[in-house]
Image (cartoon, grey):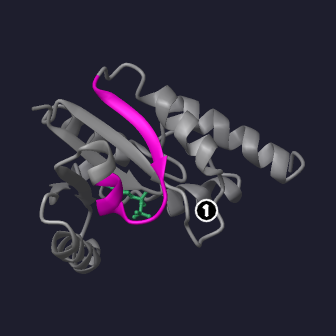
Amino acid sequence: MKRICIYPGSFDPVTNGHMDIIKRSAAMFDELIVAVLKNNSKTPLFSSEERVNMLKEVTKDISNVKVDSFSGLLVDYADKVGACTIVRGLRAVTDFEYELQMAQTNRIMNKRVDTIFLTTSLDYAYLSSSIVREVAVCGGSVDKFVPEYVSDMIGKKLEFTQGGN
Ligand code: ADP
């Protein structure tokens, strides 16, 4: 049986920290589905379609990675795609409480799906999509934080939304 893992998140935008988790978890499973959460209450920088397209571009060289989007319950999505595992990244203890609560809730709702955690590489422990957005909006370079393609897309998006300022 094919072992399928889901890496869910907002990915607004995908960062080098996410890429690290994608590469490491793809190596552990037959297939990794990077799943963009669609119904996010926050106002995103990128639409879910744009986030999916960026993820497809930056993961195109990893043969067992697929990119998709979902809404509703993650455990229902896991059943739909036949996944047995959810992977999440842990950066610091501040991530832990929420992640533990989510993992336990998901486990109670669906015993067929387990959550595993990968601790972030120290190089990326500080990195979050929201920090990347803040730096970019203030005119800073995000080249050290995201893949080159994503940095270009952020540049284009801000040029469009800020009228080139
Ligand atoms: P969410 O809004 O669901 O937290 P994110 O896109 O912010 O979605 O993050 C998706 C997952 O990636 C989460 O498990 C998060 O902890 C993890 N993650 C985010 N940034 C990093 C990073 N720098 N290193 C490792 N994991 C990370």
User: Does 75 sit above or below residue 4?
Assistant: below
Residue 84 shows in this picture? yes
Q: Residue 23 location, x and y as percent?
A: 26, 34
Q: Amino acid at mark 1?
A: Glu
Residue 145 shows in this picture? no
Image point 44% across, 46% down: which residue? 15
Residue topped by disc 1:
134
Q: Residue 134 location, x and y as percent?
A: 61, 62
Compared across the picture, whether 61 is left or right of 85 comes to: right
Q: Residue 36 location, x and y as percent?
A: 47, 50
Magenta residues? 64-78
**Closer to the camera, 127 or 6?**
6
Question: Which residue is the extreme one toward the left?
Answer: 1
Q: Residue 21 location, x and y as percent?
A: 27, 44
Question: Which residue is the extreme one toward the front?
Answer: 80
User: Does 63 sit above or below residue 37?
Assistant: above
Q: Quadrant of residue 65?
A: top left
Compared across the picture, whether 151 is left or right of 16 comes to: right
Image point 45% across, 41% down: which residue? 68
Residue 110: say if magenta.
Answer: no
Quadrant of the rendering where the N terminus is positioned:
top left
